[in-house]
Amino acid sequence: MDDSLSFESLLAGAKKFAGLALQAHRDQDDEVFVLHAGLSIERLLKAALANTNPVLLMETGAVKDDRVLLHFAGLRPIGERIRTVSASAALARIRSAGWLPKDPALDELIELRNGVVHLGPTDSDSADVLATFGRTTNTLLAHLGLDPVDYWEAWKSLIDISLNDQLERVERDVKRLIEQARHRFAERIALLPDSAVQLLQEHAGLGSIPGFPTEEDGLIIFGHVTCPGCENPNAVVLLTSNQLGRASRTERRAAYAGYACSLCSLVLPTIEQMDAAGMDVMDVDLPLLAMEKARLDSQVTELMTMLRDIQAQNDAQAQELRKSAPDTP
């Protein structure tokens, strides 16, 4: 039989496409993610069939052809590439064998993959597709007696986060973003010496970060905090000065306008995402000038309010005096 149809070859192909799919998901390339996730699932489905009996890889119409039957049985190779069963048919056989349950989400993943191949629509929530991809793969790995750690390698934590139903949606999404940021940073510094990495972190600035908020009402204050994805101590937190007040916890949360790291490209547009990332707004290091300005602005506001109150009281007293004063002839 063709070596490309062996269990080992199909499993290796499934693992390779799984890694490519997760890289594409990290880079927010949904089409490439769906394509490679679908290919990975297809290879793993066929690996499971080949592990039981390579004949299960045959298309139904080819069963009557003895040459093809003997080829898949490994008895008399034909010497040419032969079509195997389609992904949908392989899935149907896997389900008939009881190795995978019915799962509409998996059927949708296969359809999405076919849509990419044939230029059809591919709209879907990539986070949900990722969970389906991880869940299906882990079920097949368990059937084959394979260790998910060996299969997913560095992506294992990302898959675990995606399949953790105990986490709230925002927390799960943020943890996944952080894990992807760690992969992105590791990839960027892979060939750099430690001294260069430290220099990068010490001098990291805002840089060009897709999705970083740039337009807010009022003056923007740049604070700094340590990044949970790459430990960059100069990740940026944006705060609007007109809501910062005395920079209390409540005022900092109200003033929050976004977070981003230029080293691993982690972006958190909302304060809820910052909470889910385990960061505290009180840990944001604000420039002394900004802190002093916030203090002075707050004092000026209080003073102006006091002056308005005094003026209102004076006006009221003057009006009372005019009413009580005797009329002059």
Image (tube, rainbow, N blue to C red):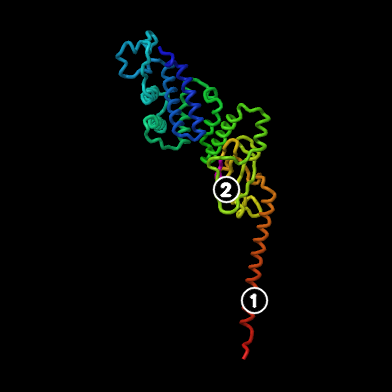
Picture quadrant where residue 311 is located: bottom right
Return the residue at label 2: 257
Q: Residue at x 47, y 26 (%)?
A: 137
* Quadrant that contains the N terminus: top left
Mark number, residue 317: 1
**Image position of 204 with respect to 299: above or below:** above
Magenta residue check for 268: yes
* Quadrant that contains the C terminus: bottom right
Q: Which residues are magenta?
A: 267-272
For the residue pair 94 and 225, the one nearer the viewer reads as 225
Q: Tag 1: residue type?
A: Gln
State which tag comes first along the sequence, 1 or 2.
2
Residue 138 in view: no
Magenta residue check for 174: no
Q: Would residue 221 appear left or right of 8 to someone viewing this image?
A: right
Q: Tag 2: residue type?
A: Ala
Local crowd size for mark 1, using a 10 Å CA cut-off: few (<14), some (14–19), many (≥20): few
The Cα–Cα distance between marks 1 and 2, rounded to whole angstroms, is: 45 Å
x and y, in percent, of residue 202 in the image? 67, 37
x and y, in percent, of residue 10 in the image? 45, 19
Residue 326 in view: yes
Q: Would residue 176 appear left or right of 69 to someone viewing this image?
A: right
Q: Residue at x 56, y 30 (%)?
A: 157
Q: Secondary structure at mark 1?
A: helix
For the residue pair 271 and 216, the one nearer the viewer reads as 216
Q: Secondary structure at mark 2?
A: strand
